[in-house]
Image (cartoon, rainbow, N blue to C red):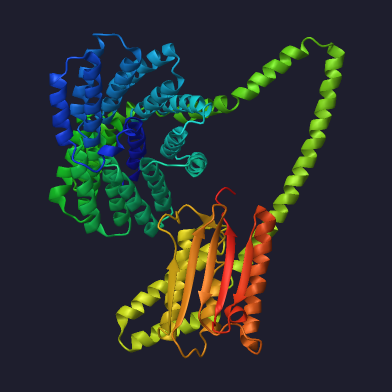
Amino acid sequence: MISNLKVKYIFILLLINLLSTQNIAFAQVDTQPQIDSLSTLFHNATELEEKKKLLKSLSNLYERKGNWEKYEEIVKQMLLLQEEKEDSFYLAETYNKLGISNSILGKNQEAVNYFQKALEINIAQKEHLIEANSYENMGAAYKDMGDYSNAVDCLLKSLEIRKESNHPRIFNNYMKLAVLQQLLDDIPNQDYYLGLAKQELQKRDSVSPSNFAIFYNELGNIYKTREMFDSCIVFYKNVIRYSEQIGWNLGIAEGLGNLADVYFETGVLDSSIIYHKQSLKLSEKILDCMGASEEYLYIAELYQELNKNDSVLFYASEALRKAEECNLLREQSLALKFIADYQSSQNKFEQAFIFLQRHYTVNDAISSADIKNNISELETKYQTKVKEQQIDLLTTENRLKNQRLRAGIFLIAVLIIVILLILYILNIRRNQAELKQNDLQQQVLRSQMNPHFIFNVLGSIQNFMLQNENREASKFLSQFASLTRGTLNNSVAETISLADEISMLKNYVELEKMRSGNKFDFNIIYSNDLEVDLIRIPPMLIQPFVENSIKHGFKNLEREGFLSLHISDKTDWVEFIIEDNGNGIHKNDEIAKEHQSMAMNIFEKRRKLIQQKHHKKFTFELLNLNDTNPKLSGVKITIDIPVLNND
């Protein structure tokens, strides 16, 4: 699919979020009755300030509704009202609103002009935080115009202002910079800015649903490039869920489009078409030119895959029409290239040549030759600004000193720096060697998997197949493949998400239940508020204890076995409580003791290695229930595993 177009969503969502933060109350209700009521109040109002407030409320409602033409019409009325009585702050806000509506409608040059006017007023009034908003908005408009150099320049200026007050919208700057790096295929810088955005989410007391939608969308994009499609579907559904909470039609449309992309990648083309058409319908409804152009082109490509030639040119032509209507050069270029390639595949070489020429003409209008170099220079200047000031200050002070004394101090300083640098490098190499050895030891410990379990599961699946229970055999074979794949992947991973750990445990227990003939039951309990996708822990620490409960706790058990796993978030660590109603650990059960001892040795080695590397508390407690209450049987294990998100 033409997936590089999808990065536009984050910019648009972050852009309109600037106006939307005060309108969440309108998210889940029909806005039309409120619009009608406010319109009546406006026509009957006589006071200027009352009219201005009513128009502002109307503009916010049309924004929630996604009707950007009416939104722009209302904001222009706000501009006319301002002329009756000069109000610089109100005028700057009006210019910002006009810039946003023009940007959404694809009129990017007009948007830049309005943002520039708002910026000039804010600079004159010394409204620095609002000045940062104008820079951010200009960066979004420049990005849509293909002017990435100016886009990064504006975003860095906005970021510099916001850092002084630790403003919550620093998250927006980091996400937009991450998207720009994606456009430039600069994966290291994309991961760098995405990591900073994640830190912003984690350190804030409250996070808006829009920011969660943005973050999950970018996570979905990353997992898609790694072909982890099951996780992609979860993340994109979260995009839709968080967007629906505040009635953000743009977010819903983008989530639907991204889901369609995943189904395309996995070969489920009919579902892909359905989701793309839903996204297209919503994009047309809210007058999202860029989104509509993208969806038309996606659908054309899908119909080409299905050899439905009658529909291919129709949707591709609609994509080109929408892009030309809104002067979207990037989308025009992609649509023209698609049509040219399609005509060529149909042996219509004359038409293909015409569209290919138009494609190259549009490409010439998109500046790209020195973009990467310019952006690198801007980032370097930004990061070294403080250092340059310090160097200038030292130079001025040194001029007042004696030449000979200055040379002596300089030589001593150089010598000290060289010595410290050598010691620093040696220390780094020593630490790296220790960490590498630590990681290798953990990989060896994590990679241990019981071969008897593998053979027994495969034998049970074979029995299902021999008994013609193909559906059950297919189900458990799929779970076994997922568990094996997860074990292989996690054996080389230092951390995994809590969601992945839970998924592996479920697959393992389901297979053990199948193998034992459903002689025990199992339950995992955790709060719905637990952000299992964001919490990262060391992998595969719980499974050995679950295995002990099943194999030894339930061995020869006359009653039905039950095993529970409670998971709780304790901020800096995750608490796991494993409890069963089995036989417990008895002194005369040598086999169970031997297996328990081996599992404990492996766990204890990993626990010490993790504590040594991350310097975080890691506790473990095992209780034989019969030791405290003779009427009870079974084992209770409490493990506090440290969260490694920031390491």
Depth check: 497 or 80 in front? 80
Depth check: 62 or 609 in front? 62
Q: Residue at position x 16%, y 18% from top?
A: 45
**Above-or-below relation of 237 to 515:** above
Please indicate whether residue 232 sits to the left or right of residue 595 in the image. left
Depth check: 284 or 266 in front? 284
Q: Residue at position x 29%, y 55% from top?
A: 264
**Above-or-below relation of 624 to 134:** below
Q: Residue 54: which quarter of the image? A: top left
On the image, the x and y values in percent for residue 554 come to 51, 84
Depth check: 167 or 321 in front? 167
**Above-or-below relation of 113 to 379:** above
Please indicate whether residue 200 sits to the left or right of residue 340 in the image. right
Residue 226 visible in the picture: yes
Please indicate whether residue 388 sits to the left or right of residue 559 in the image. right
On the image, the x and y values in percent for residue 468 come to 30, 86
On the image, the x and y values in percent for residue 240 come to 30, 48
Number of marks: 0
**Above-or-below relation of 184 to 468:** above
Residue 345 visible in the picture: no
Q: Residue at position x 49%, y 59% from top?
A: 498
Please indicate whether residue 444 sits to the left or right of residue 419 in the image. left
On the image, the x and y values in percent for residue 384 come to 60, 26
